[in-house]
Amino acid sequence: MKKKLLAVLLASAMVFGLAACGSSTEKKESSDDSKKTEESSDLIKVGIINNDPNESGYRTANDKDLQAMFTKENGYDATFAYSLKNDEQISAAQKMITDGVDYLLLSAADTSGWDSVLKDAQDAGTRVILFDRTIDADESLYEASIVSDMAKEGETACDWLKEQKLDTYNIIHIQGVMGSAAQKGRSEALNKTAESEGWNIVTQQTAEWNAEKAQQIVQSVIDAGTEFNVIYAENDDMAKGAVAALDKANISHGVKGDVLVMGYDCNKWALQELLDGNWNYDGQCNPFQASYIDEIIKKLENGETLEEKTIVMDEKGFDAKTITEEDVEKYGI
Amino acid sequence: MKENTILEMKNIHKRFPGVKALQGVDFSLNKGEIHALMGENGAGKSTLIKVLTGVYEKNEGEIYVNGIEKPAVIRSPQEAQALGISTVYQEITLCQNLSVAENMFIGRLNHNNGRSWKKMNEAADKILKNLGIPARATQQLSTCSIAIQQMVAIARAVDMDCKVLILDEPTSSLDEGEVEKLFTLMRDLKKRGVGIIFVTHFLEQVYEVCDKITVLRDGKLVGEYEIKDLPRVQLVSKMLGKELDDVSEIKDSSLAYKGTDTDVPVYEAKGLTGTTGIKPFDFEIKKGEVNGFTGLLGSGRSECVRAIFGADRTVGGTVKIDGKETKINRPIDAMKHGIAYLPEDRKGDGIVGDLSVRDNIILALQVKKGFFKPFTKAEANKFADEYIKLLNIKTASADTPIKSLSGGNQQKVILGRWLLTHPEYLILDEPTRGIDVGTKIEIQKLVLKLASEGMSITFISSETDEMLRTCSRLIVMRDGKVVGELKDDELTQNMIMSTIAGGEA
Amino acid sequence: MKLRKMTFNKQLLIPLIALLALAIFNLLADPSFYKITLGYNSAGNPVLSGYLITILDYGSELAILAIGMTLVTAATGGQDISVGAAIAIAGSVILRVLCGTETSPAHMKAPVIVAFLIAVVVAMLFGAFNGTLVSVFNIPPMVATLILYTAGRSIAAWINNNQLPIVNEKSFHVYGGFIPGIPIPTPFFIAVICAGLTALMLKFTTLGLYTQAVGINEKSSRLNGINPTFIKFLTFVILGVCVAVAALIKVSRLSTINYSVIAKDIEMDAILAVALGGNALSGGKFNMPASILGAYVIQFLTTTLYKCNVSSAALSAYKAVVVIVLVVLSAPTVKDKLSKFWNKVKPATSKEKEAA
């Protein structure tokens, strides 16, 4: 009986482990081994470590962008590894360094714990470029870091909101997962501006990037009969959830409506909502880092030096009144 | 309190919702005394024991232990144990998935046995050897037979330095050799001054080993007697509260089986091969016949009937029902052919504890009827009421969970369940185990009555006299093998013994 | 007959007391909690709104899941922790069928009923997967369903190629919103239908008796001709159907899906509903109406917490308190004490009755 139980546990642990592997660290080789050895001399070998593309629309777009850029046609031999767990990412990085990649592109799941593996990379002559997320490591350990400035995104949005010159500002603030970089940057900007401008924040709750929770939060405010005229959601999903609650209660929103709706991330469908006048504002969080990275690698290959280590990407904010079809196509993710 | 009294219970009252389980019961136990606690099912024996061991809280009364003037406070089995009161319960209360040694020492590890598994196993093996229990310390308990498990429980209690040892139906699943070993042990403990409370249904055993008898009936004290002052017949009548015809005279000659050899058997197996360690066997039973499997515990008698019913997988042999060849792979196959099986392990295989008496009664018939044809509430109630009345089941209502009934009444419910399916062939494996004399006789009478009405019945019991009273043919088993068949004049205790033993009489 | 009614009520008492406590709390804190207003939604249809309606709305999907979860719990003595992930899968299937390969088609590519039925089949298959692990391989339910719990959301994303499809037709809102002209949220009607079908199923099959028997004593059930393996398997498949229904409501609410967060942690609420219904999580006897009521009580609690501006991240902490209270109350020792107390109170009340 004891043995049986042990066997069952072991077996299920294995199956579980396999399932976990399948979901988080699936590796795709862009070329099969025989070809790789022939062509590797001409191609630049890059190892790309990213978060799970299922995480969000942002990540999906980010991954797609990278996949499209680092192809053989563009002169790259790329290996991809995905995980939301830092330790799995680190072991993937170690493997890539051992495999002798020229560049290691990294979007770390966690900010800490990377020092030793980056030193290994340096020793092995692998150059490291961070994208999307920074880490707590010495600047000398990586060549460049391409990031979004979340605080700036927030400021852009709040500046826009200020310009709307509403009579009163009663804001429902729906936050992302507490402590994430995006939440911190976007919340801070709103808090600061609200304080200086004397805006009233009706409720401030986290919906953890979850549309359903956002819907319930807004529903709760509506049920309570509290007045509000702005919804500041820290991503598109939550804005959508909020709007679903408004629609249910027949509260008009958007360009001609009573409630102003703001979101982030510039999903294509969200920009479409803007174009239709249902929402008012959407802040970009640029997932298209591949071209920046490409540029840096080209420069480094040519022996040039980079002017700045940290490169902040251009990020726009879209207003429903000015957005165009082209914007939707170009910036929608 | 007298000098050598180690336990005195005075005016104990215990009430459950709707039931007065104990009403002013007195009980006293001396050092070095084996004291039988007798009574029918529901007389209050188990309740009294549970009050004494702190499982139940009493509503009134005092308990004095070890001659201490102040009433003892016993609120949990641990507190009872601390006072030197140890119990071996009727149903096995050990942990099936632990080893024998772990079971013996669980909850009381100390520097002698708790330092290492090795030490513990050595200690356990020593005790097992002393008591002559054929089990290894490292063996998982569930791999032991029920008898061995019971003996491990006794070993555990004995090993705890107990002054009062309570044996609640310890012998109900032991065969005679094992019972004798236990008695030797009890006498040994008695010499050392341990007081033993012995709860049993076996009258013979009471007269063999006990000094005193206390009789309870309907939660009240009938009296305390010296064993020599109370002949058996009087004991039985005190337990039942009425004068009883001689117990051995149930076998009415008018009910005797009068089949002929030319009848087609209701059930016939040739070379039936099980997977539970029994040799291939042949078996048949005819309409209206009562036969039985006998043999020592572990001889394979239960395994045989389980193979017949499809409870265990069979891998060979042919089965004919009413002369037609058929296959029985699962219990449902057997049920569809009108076979019913009352299992040996009532608690583990029989009752569905949390379900009501009603659901327990209708279960088998319902399954037979089919998934999409549930009985209406009215039908279910009708069946339940009918069998509660027919079998005289003592229950507050049909809604009462079966687990709150006494053992004998639980058994009657299971019996009712199978009778309700109107089987042509009924297998009863130890139907009288752990139940009181009155119910035993009722069941035996019922068996003969049903047979006279045309039902075929296979009856298994550890008590050979029960088998002799009911069966017209006995199949004798030894070591998983059929070693003989006795009928007519051969049906005597001596013949059975000698066949089991394998020698000539 | 009288007695049966009493035992039936006794189990319903647990969720009812919890409901009463919450109701009183809200009444004291802010009576406007109970305000219900009739308005018109953006499509011009009459709709009721207010906290109670919200509870009815969101509690319904939970109630539907609680039905399946109750059966699984009863038969196997364990719980399915993969229902949230399974909802993601079923929801993904619905959108895959409705949207085809486009992410945001102007019109649905298939009738909703077709999409729903396909989702039902898929969810039943995943239920069957769980059921097989539990019933055939005897893996404890929590461990067995951990597999789908882990992998389910990735599978859901894979079904739609990592795209987030959107249904643009307003008619799709009906299932998670309102039927035009009827001011009560549709999920409530769906829950009523599910409860009704369950009642019929329990009345016209022996499922209730079998699941309880298997959950209480599997060996004995087998000897009475029941096939415990099949019964356990069946309960998981039924839960699969419940999952598909809940998934339809979920995706209809937003017309889209987010694989990583849709129905997140809903399994915990569903299990909690079963527990709040006074059903033993170790299996055996169950009371379906109590589970369903339990689901609405959980939503009552959630809505109350939202109203009190408790951050949604802290919701689970508050629910944990409820779990602790429940577990403590259902512990044998406490039950014993309570029944003693009850017995002390009861004679007094019954005497009063006699006097009256």
Image (tube, helix red, strand yellow):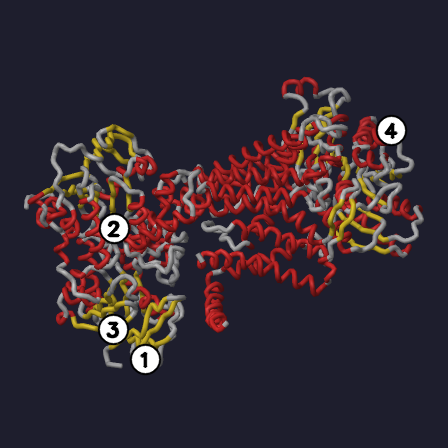
The earlier-in-sequence mark between 2 and 1 is 1
Question: Which residue is labeled 4 in the image?
Answer: A326
Closer to viewer: mark 1 or mark 3: 3
**Disc 1 target residue:** B68
Do the residues indicated by labels 1 and 3 lie within the same chain of the protein?
yes
Residue bearing mark 3? B29
Contact check, label 4 and label 2, Cβ < 8 Å? no
Which residue is at 29% across, 34% downward?
Answer: B314
Q: Do badges 4 and 3 share one subunit?
A: no
Which comes before the other along the chain, label 3 or label 2?
A: 3
Q: Chain of mark 4?
A: A
Viewer-side residue, A173 vs B108: A173
Lateral position of residue C316 relative to residue B504, left or right: right
SS assignment at label 1: loop
Near mark 3 (Cα within 10 A), the count class, few <14, some 14-19 or many ≥20, is many
At x 30%, y 63%, the residue is B42
Q: Which residue does the numbered mark 2 point to in the structure image?
A: B431
**The residue marked by circle 3 belongs to what chain?**
B
| Secondary structure beneath label 3 | strand
The three-letter amino acid code for the residue at tag 1 is Ile
Give the mark toward the camera: 3 or 2. Answer: 2
- The answer to the question of whether label 3 and label 2 lie on touching residues, with beta carbons closer than 8 A, is no
Ranked by sequence position, the earlier of labels 1 and 3 is 3
Foreground label between 4 and 2: 2
